[in-house]
Amino acid sequence: MEIRNCKVIGLGRDPAAIVGYAIRERDKKDREARSQRDANIAYDEVWCVVDVDQHKTLDQAVVEARRGHVNLVVSMPCFELWILYHFEDCAAPCDQERVRQRLKKHMKGYDKHLGRDFPFTNHEIAGERARRADPEHCEPNRKGGNPSTNAWLIVEAIRRSGRNR
């Protein structure tokens, strides 16, 4: 699989600020691509990843992502749910602490970093678990129930990108 350009930027916790930055960055690259007459400079897709947490700007971020044609992935209660789905199902409502406790059973000393032994190849079963937990959470720019994540959409986009090269 070949991915031409994948840029990952950590921007903090405010979903609306993350989406706003992504739109501005995408627009900047679009202008640069036009001025240099080089379509390879522009991004094919732009994705933002946020947790539900207690964010007051999440609804605004969803609206702005739709309006700005940016793909927003929302995990409820937290992104670690996507990581947990690589190991086990999680269908009952839970909070961040419960997800992290369950995750630590599989990843001793987990501290928001994935080790070399993380089962990346379990992404398909993780996606199945995510879809089973919230079948309606199957597109970007949507908040799901608790628990839910549509992080599998990014994996699918990357895989699609690799097949299209």
Image: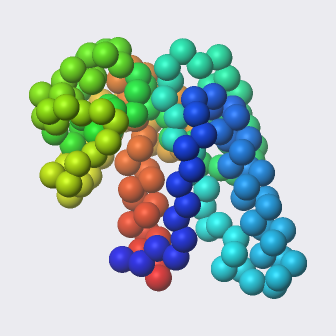
Picture layout, residue 163 above or below residue 27: below
Picture layout, residue 53 above or below residue 25: above
Colour scheme of the picture: rainbow
User: Residue 75: percent from the left, percent from the top?
Assistant: 44, 31
Residue 44 vs residue 104, the one in the foreground: 104
Residue drawn at (46%, 61%) of the image: 157
Q: Is residue 89 visible?
A: no
Q: Quadrant of residue 7?
A: bottom right
Judge left or right: residue 7 versus residue 83.
right
Residue drawn at (35%, 24%) of the image: 147
Residue 38 vs residue 62, the one in the foreground: 38
Labels in figure, total:
0
Q: Quadrant of residue 28?
A: bottom right
Judge left or right: residue 78 versus residue 59.
left
Judge left or right: residue 18 versus residue 10.
right
User: Residue 111: percent from the left, percent from the top?
Assistant: 30, 33
Residue drawn at (52%, 65%) of the image: 6
Judge left or right: residue 73 versus residue 88.
right
User: Residue 38: percent from the left, percent from the top?
Assistant: 75, 83
User: Residue 70: percent from the left, percent from the top?
Assistant: 65, 49
Residue 8 vs residue 66, the one in the foreground: 8
The N terminus appears in which quarter of the rendering? bottom left
Q: Is residue 112 visible?
A: yes
Residue drawn at (65%, 67%) of the image: 43
Picture layout, residue 40 above or below residue 10: below
